[in-house]
């Protein structure tokens, strides 16, 4: 039996891309206005606020204070979570638990960033005092590239196979009006794009963007009276590996498989039930790993699985992934738009990119130096 | 010491009481690691507390320096002035015989000839007057 004790009743986002005239506050307001409009809920009804501080918000973990003040929200329940790309899921999950337990009636989950305009780099090394940067372990692609290299060595996975993920996501973005990258790309474009961190090319990487996203979480009862069809949270899971060096299979991110297994269990579903999957894709290789972790293919077989794109594309013969283009082509909102697209797919409002009869959606997120992961199952 | 754009400084570790024996060991061309006096687990990087049993008691011991190339990448972008002058350079993830894993660089082998699973042995590279960094060479 699916959990269904909280629902997403509204989603909204700002324009995406390069928006030099905006600030995180104005973008957050735009996303919140759109989410309120989407749900029909009044701002005065919001009594919970959870946020992910954007890279251009210097208040960092006190971001909830700043957003609360500027957006005029005095919540009963609040806080900021800092888990990188796993935070969107983690915020919605915390909101769902708060709603279930009566600590809030409507929780606004918000992320806003002007990373592109600010020229922010996402290149933090880890390793504490003995920082990995001593050996030049720099740039955000490094950890993902390291995992890809070992996957290639163990299973014969190739860069061309990653290319099919990039090409497919771009095809999906072309059907998404707000997507930042809509120009079609070919496998040859992927292969000839410059190497960033070998084995990852430029077209394996997401694009830093300005923008904001808001997700409103409430009780199933309240959601029934909202403007749009409510989307229930069927299952939730998280998993984390903090000990990068001490965990032998850290490169393969075992916590990602665990977080999806927990979400499946809570939802009472399995891989065969998934109609559409919104998989966190800071790099193409992330999708490859998720497909195996989600049980959509066997361990080591994601390379052949994505080849040709037919099993991951809309209208193909598998589970369509990242139907709005994902971080790679829709916009790099650190996975927040993955939740939004999951909601829209379950509502059935995606027009040309709608997955027919989509009833169960898997949404995942991952972050930091590949330490954190969250997964959700969304359904009716 | 003045630094010109042509002579950027390498990225240095932050030396503390905890990790000083490791970096002193590098100066003497010895790869050192802590061993917990309570549960015997080897640990790297240096830490005040054993993450397995939480004991602070430990001894330093010299590692064999032998291991395997667990994975590696070749970075083509310059994210820091020192490393920007060295692109494309490799970053190696090494698993030592004793079971600990560390980031490093492979020297003496072209990046194109690196393979996951290659046997490696520690070497030491002087990076300026006050820093000796453990790197690895492919053996056999």
Image (cartoon, grey):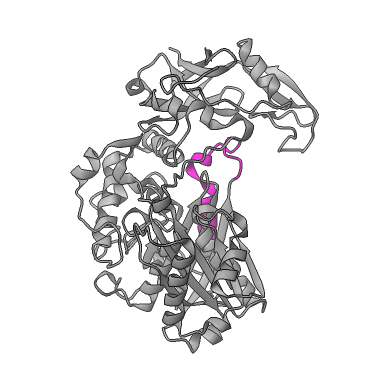
Magenta span includes B4: no
Tell me the residue at 40%/66% (across/down).
A274
Tell me the residue at 80%/29% (across/down).
B57
Residue nearest the observer in this picture, A95 or A2 = A95
In the rendered view, tell whether residue B37 sits above or below residue A238: above
| Left or right of A235, for residue A337 | left
The C terminus of chain A - image quarter: bottom left
Q: Quadrant of residue A339?
A: bottom left
Q: Quadrant of residue A333?
A: bottom left
In the rendered view, tell whether residue A35 sits above or below residue A247: below
Q: Which residues are magenta?
A: A242-261
The percent coordinates of residue A24 (x first, y second) are: 47, 62
Q: Quadrant of residue A150?
A: top left
The N terminus of chain A - image quarter: bottom right
Magenta span includes A257: yes
The percent coordinates of residue A224 (x first, y second) are: 49, 87
The percent coordinates of residue A330 (x first, y second) are: 33, 60
Tell me the residue at 53%/47% (across/down).
A368
Residue nearest the observer in this picture, A207 or A345 = A207
């Amino acid at each position: 039996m699916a959990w269904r004790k909280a629902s997403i009743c509204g989603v909204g986002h700002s324009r995406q891309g390069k928006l030099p005239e905006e600030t995180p506050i104005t973008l957050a307001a735009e996303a919140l206005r759109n989410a309120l409009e989407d749900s029909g809920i009044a701002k005065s009804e919001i009594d919970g606020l959870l946020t992910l501080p954007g890279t251009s918000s210097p208040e960092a973990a006190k971001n909830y204070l700043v957003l609360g003040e500027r957006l005029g929200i005095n919540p009963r329940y609040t806080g900021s979570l800092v888990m990188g790309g796993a935070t969107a899921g983690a915020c919605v999950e915390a909101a769902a638990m708060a709603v279930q337990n009566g600590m809030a009636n409507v929780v606004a989950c918000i992320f806003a960033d002007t990373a592109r305009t600010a020229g922010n780099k996402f290149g933090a090394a880890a390793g504490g005092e003995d920082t990995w940067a001593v050996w030049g372990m720099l740039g955000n692609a490094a950890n993902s590239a390291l995992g890809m290299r070992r996957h290639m060595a163990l299973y014969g996975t190739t860069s061309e196979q990653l290319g099919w993920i990039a090409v497919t996501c771009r095809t999906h973005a072309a059907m998404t009006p707000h997507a930042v990258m809509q120009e079609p790309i070919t496998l040859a474009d992927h292969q000839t794009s410059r190497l960033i961190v070998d084995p990852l090319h430029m077209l394996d990487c997401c694009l830093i963007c300005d923008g904001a996203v808001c997700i409103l979480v409430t009780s199933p009862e309240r959601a029934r009276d909202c403007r749009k069809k409510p989307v229930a949270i069927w299952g939730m899971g998280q998993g984390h590996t903090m000990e990068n060096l001490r965990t032998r299979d850290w490169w393969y991110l075992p916590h990602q498989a665990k977080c999806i297994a927990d979400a499946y269990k809570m939802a009472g579903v399995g891989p065969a039930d998934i109609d559409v999957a919104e998989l966190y894709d800071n790099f193409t290789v992330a999708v490859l790993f998720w497909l195996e972790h989600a049980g959509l293919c066997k361990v080591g077989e994601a390379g052949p699985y994505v080849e040709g794109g037919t099993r991951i594309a809309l209208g193909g013969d598998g589970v369509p992934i990242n139907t709005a283009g994902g971080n790679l082509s829709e916009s790099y909102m650190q996975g927040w738009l993955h939740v939004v697209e999951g909601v829209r797919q379950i509502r059935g409002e995606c027009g040309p990119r709608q997955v027919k009869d989509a009833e169960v959606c898997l949404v995942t997120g991952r972050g930091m130096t590949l330490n954190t992961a969250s997964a959700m199952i969304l359904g009716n | 010491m003045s630094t010109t754009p042509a002579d950027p400084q390498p990225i240095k570790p932050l030396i503390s009481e905890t990790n000083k024996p490791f970096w002193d060991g590098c100066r003497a061309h010895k790869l050192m690691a802590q061993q917990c006096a309570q549960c015997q687990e080897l640990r790297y990087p240096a830490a005040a507390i054993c993450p397995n049993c939480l004991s602070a008691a430990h001894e330093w011991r010299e590692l064999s320096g032998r291991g395997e190339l667990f994975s590696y990448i070749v970075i083509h972008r310059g994210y820091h002035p020192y490393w920007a002058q060295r692109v494309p350079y490799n970053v190696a993830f090494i698993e030592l015989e004793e079971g600990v894993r560390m980031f490093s660089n492979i020297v003496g082998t072209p990046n194109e000839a690196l393979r996951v699973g290659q046997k490696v042995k520690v070497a030491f590279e002087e990076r300026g007057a006050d820093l000796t960094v453990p790197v690895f060479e492919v053996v056999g």
